Image: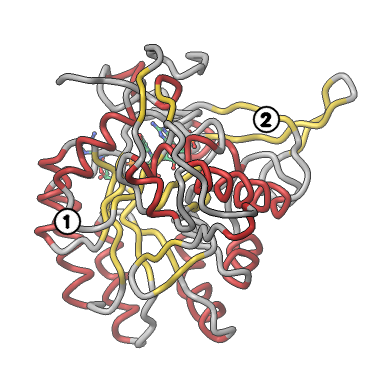
Amino acid sequence: MENVFDYEDIQLIPAKCVVDSRSECDTTATLGNHTFRLPVVPANMQTIIDENIATYLAENNYFYVMHRFEPETREAFIKKMQEQNLIASISVGVKEEEYAFVEGLASKALIPEFITIDIAHGHSNAVIRMIQHIKKHLPESFVIAGNVGTPEAVRELENAGADATKVGIGPGKVCITKIKTGFGTGGWQLAALRWCAKAASKPIIADGGIRTHGDIAKSVRFGASMVMIGSLFAGHEESPGETVEKDGKLYKEYFGSASEFQKGEKRNVEGKKMFVEHKGSLQDTLTEMEQDLQSSISYAGGTKLEAIRNVDYVVVKNSIFNGDKVY
Ligand SMILES: NC(=O)C1=CN([C@@H]2O[C@H](COP(=O)(O)OP(=O)(O)OC[C@H]3O[C@@H](n4cnc5c(N)ncnc54)[C@H](OP(=O)(O)O)[C@@H]3O)[C@@H](O)[C@H]2O)C=CC1
Ligand SMILES: Nc1nc2c(ncn2[C@@H]2O[C@H](COP(=O)(O)O)[C@@H](O)[C@H]2O)c(=O)[nH]1
C-alpha cells in the first residue's frame, strides 16, 4: 500500500478564516437519528466508562457506548436509561449467550438506540451473523460493527446490515496485538482510516491511537464520522478503576479489554495495564476538546465539522509506534 502514515506524520493546512470567534464553530456530529455535541465517544472499556459516566454523557448530549463486561447488568441499564428519556447504547460480543440476550431484549420490547458489536477481529462470519441476528430481532437499533482495518471488511459488514463500522486493530494505547500477532493498523491507523473511508457508504468510527485533540480533527479529515478514544479519557476523577499514589502524585489504572486484568486469566492476552496521571474532571477534558475542535474548524476555514474534510495536508515525517512504549 502506498502513502502509509499515522497521526503524528500529518499536518493539516489552514484555510482563510470565516468566523470572528471560535465560539461560532459548530462541533456537533450526527450518528443515526441522533446529533451529539462532539464527534467523540469514550471507549467502551471498563476503566473508561461505567453507568454513572454513561448517564452523565447522555444527559449532556455526548455519545457514549457502555462496555459489555458486566453482561448481566445490561437489561436493567437499558431500562434505566430509557425511563430517564436518555439513549441506551450498549455493547455485545458474539458468543452463543449473546444471541439469546438479543432475543430477550426483543421479547421485552427493550430496544437500545445503539448496539456496538465489540470484537477484536471484526472481519469474521461471527460478526456478520450477529449483525444479521440483531437486524432481524431489533431492526430499529443502530448497529456499529467492528473492529476492522480493510475496505473489504467495511463493505462486508455494511452489506450484512451494519449501520456503521469501527476501524482500528492494534493502535490502542494499551494494545499489544501489533506486537503479539504482527497484525493490525498500529503505526498507520490514519492511513488505514482513509483507506477504509474510501470504501464506506455508511459512517466510520475511528478507534484507537488518538493521542492529542488535534488527532480528532485529523480523523475527521480522513473520513471519520466519530472518533473512539480510550487513553485521553482515562485517569479522570470520575473514571472507574483503582487510584494509586506514587511519590506524592495520583495515578489511575487503564487496562485493555483483552488484558489479563480484564479476562482474569492469561489466555489470548492482547492488552496491557498502565497507570495514567490523574487528570481532574471529565467535563474539563470534554470542554477543552470542544474548544480545540472549534479552533480546528476555524483553521479549516469553515463553521461546521464538515469544513475539516476538505482541507489540504502535508506528510511531515514517519514513525511506527506512535510514541507508545511496547510494555
Ligand atoms: N481494537 C483492537 O485492536 C482490539 C480490541 N480488543 C478488545 O478486547 C476485547 C476482547 O475481544 P475478543 O477477544 O474479540 O472478544 P471475546 O473474548 O468476547 O471473543 C469473541 C469470540 O471471538 C473469538 N475470537 C477472538 N479473537 C479471534 C480471532 N483473532 N480469530 C478468531 N476468533 C477470535 C473468541 O474465541 P477464542 O477466544 O477462543 O479465540 C470468541 O469466541 C474486546 O473488547 C475488543 O474490543 C482486543 C484485541 C484487539
Ligand atoms: N489490542 C487491544 N486493543 C484494545 C484493548 N482494549 C481496548 N482496545 C482498543 O483500544 C481502543 C482505545 O485506544 P486508545 O489509543 O484511545 O487508548 C479501544 O477503543 C479498543 O478498540 C486490548 O486489550 N487490546
Say which element carries label 2: strand
Which label was assigned to residue 275?
A: none
Residue designated by label 1: 201
Residue at 52% across / 41% down in the picture?
230
Applied colour scheme:
secondary structure
Q: Check disc 2 and give the amino acid type.
A: Val
Q: What percent of the width, then of the height, locates residue 297?
A: 50, 48
**Residue at the disc numbered 2:** 276
Task: Determine the secondary structure under disc 1.
Answer: loop
User: Quadrant location of residue 197?
Assistant: top left
- Measure how far apart labels 2 and 1 are at the Cα level: 37 Å
Q: Quadrant of ligand 1?
A: top left
Instruction: Identify the residue shown where x is 75% and y is 31%.
Output: 251
- Spot occupied by residue 17 in the image (x, y as percentages of width and height): 52, 46
Q: Earlier in the sequence, mark 2 or mark 1?
A: 1
Q: Residue at x 49, y 52 (%)?
A: 40
In the image, taking residue 70 as reference, residue 201 lies left or right, namely left
